[in-house]
Amino acid sequence: MTSINRDALIAAARAARDQAYAPYSRFHVGAAVLTANGDIIPGCNIENAAYPSTMCAERVALHNAYAHGARHIIALAVIADTPGPVSPCGGCRQVMAELCPGAVIFLANTAGVWVETSLPQLLPGAFDPNDLPS
Ligand code: THU
């Protein structure tokens, strides 16, 4: 069983943030996910001149992990330069509910403040695959 090195995961998210492509908002976000086999996979926000085509850091990290074949995500960290720990957007919370429902979630800021949370806390009553007809 892979153990969670919180500081390493937040450090990876911080490093991923350096790759953010955010020329419009200038709000740089980094994320990193820890897979069951111990891999740490990064993501950063990637904006687009057609603004709705922007992708958040958390989703880039999760999609990156899935694209690498990971299907069991143990933990996810996200970091930005916010007054307190960054708050994931609603769309990312929904994607987390699909792709890493049991993950430990670390929300951090660049000043070193972090909190540990979970999907049930971030998105209580999430619509999930079990809500679809069989
Ligand atoms: N952003 C993220 O990457 N994650 C979030 O949870 C909130 C917002 C990005 C999207 C956009 O590039 C910028 O932050 C401003 O909204």
Image: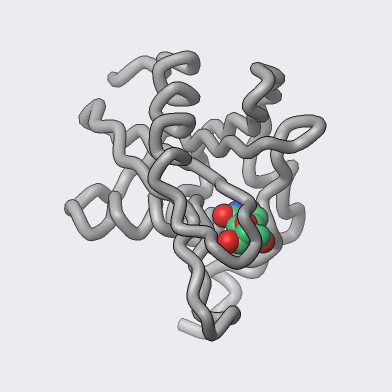
Task: Identify the residue at horizontal 49%, vertical 25% (top origin).
Answer: 10
Tell how many labels. 0
Quarter of the figure that contains the N terminus: top left
Task: Identify the residue at horizontal 48%, vertical 14% (top origin).
Answer: 7
| Quarter of the rendered image showing ligand 1 | bottom right
Vertical comparison of 47 with 5: above or below: below
Task: Identify the residue at horizontal 74%, vertical 42% (top origin).
Answer: 121
Horizontal and vertical percent for residue 70?
24, 48
Vertical comparison of 40 with 98: above or below: above
Q: Nearer the viewer, residue 52 or 106?
A: 52
Whether residue 16 sits left or right of residue 69 in the image: it is right
Q: In the current view of this chain or complex, which residue is farthest to the right?
A: 83
Horizontal and vertical percent for residue 96?
53, 54
Q: Nearer the viewer, residue 24 or 113?
A: 24
Residue 123 visible in the current orientation: yes
Visual colour scheme: one colour
Residue 93 visible in the current orientation: no
Vertical comparison of 88 with 73: above or below: below
Horizontal and vertical percent for residue 32?
41, 38
Q: Nearer the viewer, residue 103 or 57?
A: 57
Task: Identify the residue at horizontal 64%, vertical 33% (top origin).
Answer: 107
Horizontal and vertical percent for residue 62?
39, 53
